[in-house]
Image (cartoon, rainbow, N blue to C red):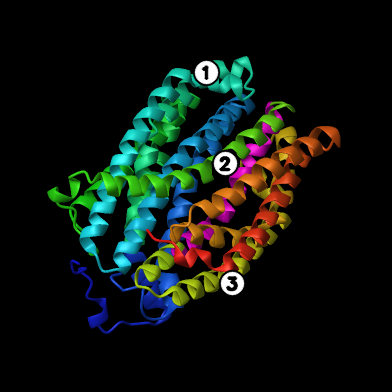
Amino acid sequence: MSELNINASAKTLDNSFWSILKEAVRGSERDFTQGSIGTAIIILAVPMIIEMFAESLFAIVDIFYVSKLGADAVAVVAITETMMYVIFSVAMGISIGATASVARRIGEKDADGAARAATHSIYLGIVASIIMGIIGAIFAPQFLRLLGASENVISIGTDFTRIMLGGNVVVMFLFLLNAIFRGAGNAAIAMRVLWIANLVNIVLCPIFIFVLNWGVTGAAIGTTIGRGVGVAIAAYALFRGNSRFTIERKHWQIDYSRLWRLVKLGSPATLQFFIQTASFIGLIRVVAGFGSDAVAGYSIGWRVVIFGILPSVGLANAAATLVGQNLGAENPKRAEKAVWTTVFINAIIQTLVGLVFVLLAHPIVRIFTDDPNVMRYAVDCLTIVSYGFFFYGVGMVIETSFNGAGDTWTPTILNFFVFWLFEIPLAYLLAYKFEMGPDGVFWAIFLAFSMLTVVSAFVFKLGRWKLKKV
């Protein structure tokens, strides 16, 4: 095995709280298979949480500016974002395979293997993004119609959808390259990449939408350019070499057995997120039956919810990295302890966030719209879904930890039963049969995610994930 270029163990490390925070933001060379688990969680989670906030800002910025164009424009973004979930699911599936493989090799102190895992993950990303981009660009208006968009929404939104789907390569590689950094323990690089990309988007979106008068299409152009800048920076950081491993020409030689292992690892992860995606598509199709105001309100409320869950995602990703690296170091007890420590922290944080959203739902929604009909749906969505933030915080860490261990089938199966066989039928029944309208969808979301958390915790305690080979 090749030696990892990590010298942190030989250094005297300052473990004061503020020093740890500074190390988290600047980047760390620590060996996360040793030392304090709490310190490791902070160093990994802080930049990952900031990164997740930055990723969510793309959606928040878009909806903030586009909301000034009216409910139909918001519906364009909402429905297209639902289609983007398919792309996100593929990108996240490949990224999970990359994170798990790189983290496991890092834990084994195999820098050469980590580099090869990175390059072969990139190969998968290239193929997937090309296929999805061609299909999305050609069939954009048909997809909008399939999801219940009105003719006016299709008319003003086709170009937006074509750009977002056709330019999915920037989404794919923003996810993938940052996943490689996270698996290696270089979470600070991923954080900086996302913030730079967001700054570009924040500057360009209002210029393209209002100054150049490109309307909702301008939002797609600004977002795609912003993400493209982020990809360029991430690629430069990866290929110029980092403290964990260096990619050389020899690492680009295709190893079909390695590629196949990544496919087997990433495929169920892709299916896992596609199942979630399909449930979101099903839900927005149910909501679309109540008109553009309901779709716009759901979109605004759900985006705020996602923004609030981001600390959970960041902490969950930190736990996944620790699980992968410590299983690679043949220390499953430390891996499990890292998960439960992260669960405890996350449960407290998410409960507080949910409480804030419930108490301040009206003023938060008012930031995005002053349309009374849209506000009513957005406030209901934010309030009802926020009741379950404790469960989301716990469940997010546990499900992501399965993925970090390379056990991607377990959360996939759980997602199938909870989201397809429970959530979507329940949403339809509550919305239409029990005449609860869109509120029935919001209650279905709350109940489904809460159930998923309870079942996931039970399965995790069985410990079979510790035996997974990557």
The kind of residue tagged 1 is Pro
Q: Name the residue under label 2.
A: 275
Q: How many residues crowd mark 3 within 10 Å: few (<14), some (14–19), many (20+)? A: few
Where is residue 403? Give x, y as percent: 47, 56
Looking at the image, which residue is at 40% across and 75% down? 331
Provide the secondary structure element on which disc 2 rests. Answer: helix
Q: In this rendered view, identify the residue nearer to me: 117 or 142.
A: 117
Question: Could you tell me which quadrant the N terminus lies in?
Answer: bottom left
SS of the residue at dot 3? helix
- Left or right: residue 360 versus residue 400 is right
Task: Please state the horizontal and vertical placement of residue 212, each as a whole percent of the image.
Answer: 41, 24
Kindly indicate whether the residue at mark 1 contacts the one at mark 2 (C-beta within 8 angstroms): no
Q: Give the range drawn in magenta.
A: 292-319
Residue occupied by mark 1: 141
Residue at 69% in and 28% down: 288
- In the image: residue 357, left or right of residue 247: right
Q: In this view, does 41 lie above or below 291?
A: below
Alpha carbons under labels 2 and 1: distance apart? 23 Å
